[in-house]
Each structure stands twice: as C-alpha cells, then as structure tokens.
Image (spheres, helix red, strand yellow):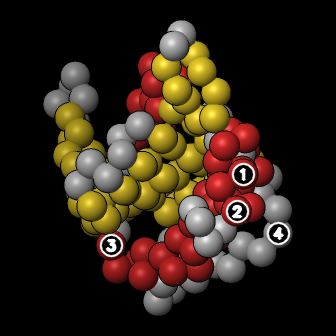
Amino acid sequence: MQNSPALRKRIENSRTEINGQTAFIPESERIYNVMLKLARGHAAFELSQPSRTEPDHFWCGALSSLPKDSQEIFHSVHFQQILGEIGARNMQRLLVTQMIMQSETGEQKNIRMLINDWIDVQDNQYRYIAIDDMGVIIIRIVIAEYFACEVAWGALNNLL
C-alpha cells in the first residue's frame, strides 16, 4: 500500500461501518469489468465465440439473493438443443446419453440427450458453465459458492 497511494485511497474510501463491524463496499463498475472479462474469456475459450459487444443480459450478486426457483435454474445442467461451433472445446465436454421413457400404456420411447455440465476449476472456489445454444451464448460463474454471475449475448430466454 505504500507504493500505491491511489489504491490505498480507493480502499479507504470503500470502507464503512455497519453495526460496529468494518465492511467494504465494492466498486460496482470494477466488478462489472472483471466479471465481463471472465465471461468473455470463457465464451472464447470454451465456445470459440468472441463476444466483443456489450452483453444483452448481465447479473451479478450473492447466490442467496436469488429466489429458490431461480437458484435451481442457475445451478442446473443445460440440455443442448443445437450443437455449437464444431471443434470448440465445449463440444468435447458434452455428455451424450439416452433415456428410455415408458408411458402408462407400456409404450417405450428412446430419448437422446446432449448434456452440458458445469466445469469445476477448483472445488467450492470457482466453477462455470458455457452455453451456446439456439442463438444464445450464456456464461454462468460461481465464486466461493457465494458470488454468482450470469452474462448473455443473443435472444434472451430462461435467464435470471
């Protein structure tokens, strides 16, 4: 901090007291920039989709701030409808599976599925899912199982 007085001043300015406890109010613009860079990196690395424009959807916050049904959607795997960029890293990670459904009349039907699951970079510290499906790119990130982010480009359906 001695070598960077500007940084020291910014940290001191973000400091506050809440109920006798010291707390720091983060700079929302800096959080936006960092999370957007992470999302763009995941889109480029996993999906081979450079996402240089401003996103159509951006949300960051505590996971606990989401309603229960939104948390379930956020944490779920993605059932891929259309294949993304051939040769993209994400294509190598898709789980191909099949289920046999049986109706009440006994008729069986095979259902084939492509499942896109979360990538755990470090257990309970950092995970993400990169989705490229139906004209939409969605990147979801969870840090320390507390802070979450969802960034999307394209038509917006099923987002928080």
Residue for point 74% across, 61% down = 6
* Above or below, comparing residue 88 to residue 61 in the picture: below
In this view, the mark in front (1 or 3): 1
Dot placed on the residue nearer the N-terminal end, 2 or 3: 2
Q: Which mark is residue 9?
A: 1
Q: Are marks 2 and 1 in contact (CB under 8 Å)?
A: yes
Q: Which residue is mark 2?
A: 5
Residue type beneath disc 2: Pro
Binning the other alpha carbons within 10 Å of mark 2 as few (below 14), some (14 to 19) or many (20 upward) gives few
Residue 48 sits in which quadrant?
Answer: bottom right
In the rendered image, the quadrant that contains the C terminus is top right
Residue for point 23% across, 55% down = 123
Using the image as rendered, state which of residue 60 and residue 117 is in the foreground.
60
Residue 154 sits in which quadrant?
Answer: bottom right
Q: SS at mark 2?
A: helix
In this view, the mark in front (1 or 4): 1
Report whether residue 39 is seen: no
Report the residue that reaches farthest toward the front.
2
Binning the other alpha carbons within 10 Å of mark 3 as few (below 14), some (14 to 19) or many (20 upward) gives some
Residue type beneath disc 1: Lys
Q: SS at mark 1?
A: helix
Q: Which residue is mark 3?
A: 93
Q: SS at mark 3?
A: helix
The spot of residue 92 in percent (x, y) is 34, 79
